[in-house]
Amino acid sequence: MTVKILVVDDEAEIVRVLRGYLEQAGYQVLTAYDGNEALRRARQEAPNLIILDLMLPGMDGIDVCRRVRESSDVPIIMVTARVEETDRVLGLELGADDYVTKPFSPREVVARVRAVLRRYSRSARDKDEMLVVDDLRLDVGRRTVTCGNETADLTPSEFEILRTLMQAPGRVYTRLQLLEAAQGAAYEGYDRTIDTHIKNLRRKIEPSSCSPTYILTVHGIGYKIREP
């Protein structure tokens, strides 16, 4: 099956370069140059992954990400020329799985794409896996998470982080270990993005995100899921 990648950027040269590298890697590439076109193509073409620029004419990348996440868990890699941490964190909080900053290496982007898709395919292979910690249940095959009677809508990165934690209740994972579980490789300088993913997970699965009972912080090290 051909894997479809939607590349969204208002700079034609960036789209051209990324398209060339991605097609050389064997992917089918769809393109869009503004937010409205990106949303339309995402809904009509059902890509396997979206590379999404933050600054777009019309509807910006933040709004596109928010709208896509209303109906799809397709992996999203955010591209931004901004360097402020608040911009990167905002994209992650809205459901982006990863981000790269301009100027970037097209080879790095292809590596990120492969890592995200590899993680997604691993979940498909392990479709019979069911993980349970008290009222928290994660079904790999259906890609669902329920806490009690409530269903949590997780992004692919959030799902893989929670899956990693639930596979070994009580084990402490560093941020870099969780980053590798989420993205397939540990990229130097990006480990603090895990804090944002954990914040999102707690908001979605904890009875009170301010007093978490499932995902526990181990100060100075990282995180663990409580033992049943």
Image: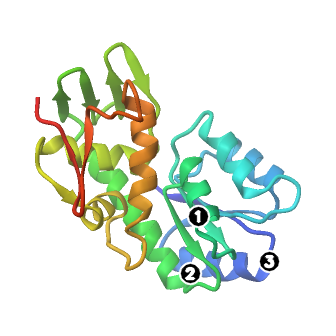
- Specify few, some or many for label 1: CA neighbours under 10 Å numbering under 14, 14-19, or 20 or more: many
- Seen at 68% across and 74% down, the residue is 82
Cα–Cα gap, marks 1 and 2: 24 Å
Q: Which residue is mark 1?
A: 88
- Label drawn at residue 12: 3
Q: Is residue 27 left or right of residue 45?
A: left
Corner quadrant of residue 99? bottom right
Q: Position of residue 167 (x, y in %)?
A: 15, 43
Q: Residue furthest right?
A: 58
Which amino acid type is marked by label 1? Arg
Dot in front, 1 or 2: 1
Check whether the beta carbons of the residues at disc 1 and disc 3 lie within 8 A of each other: no
Location of residue 82 with respect to 60 vertically, above or below? below
Question: In the rendered view of the protein, which quadrant contains the N terminus?
Answer: bottom left
Cα–Cα gap, marks 3 and 2: 14 Å
- Specify few, some or many for label 2: CA neighbours under 10 Å numbering under 14, 14-19, or 20 or more: some
Location of residue 5 with respect to 141 vertically, above or below? below
Dot in front, 1 or 3: 1
Q: Is residue 212 left or right of residue 78?
A: left
Q: Earlier in the sequence, mark 3 or mark 2?
A: 3
Q: Is residue 9 left or right of residue 200?
A: right
Q: Which residue is mark 2?
A: 21
Along the viewing direction, whichever of 2 and 132 lies nearer the viewer: 132
Location of residue 208 with respect to 4 vertically, above or below? above
- Seen at 62% across and 77% down, the residue is 18
Along the viewing direction, whichever of 147 and 31 lies nearer the viewer: 147
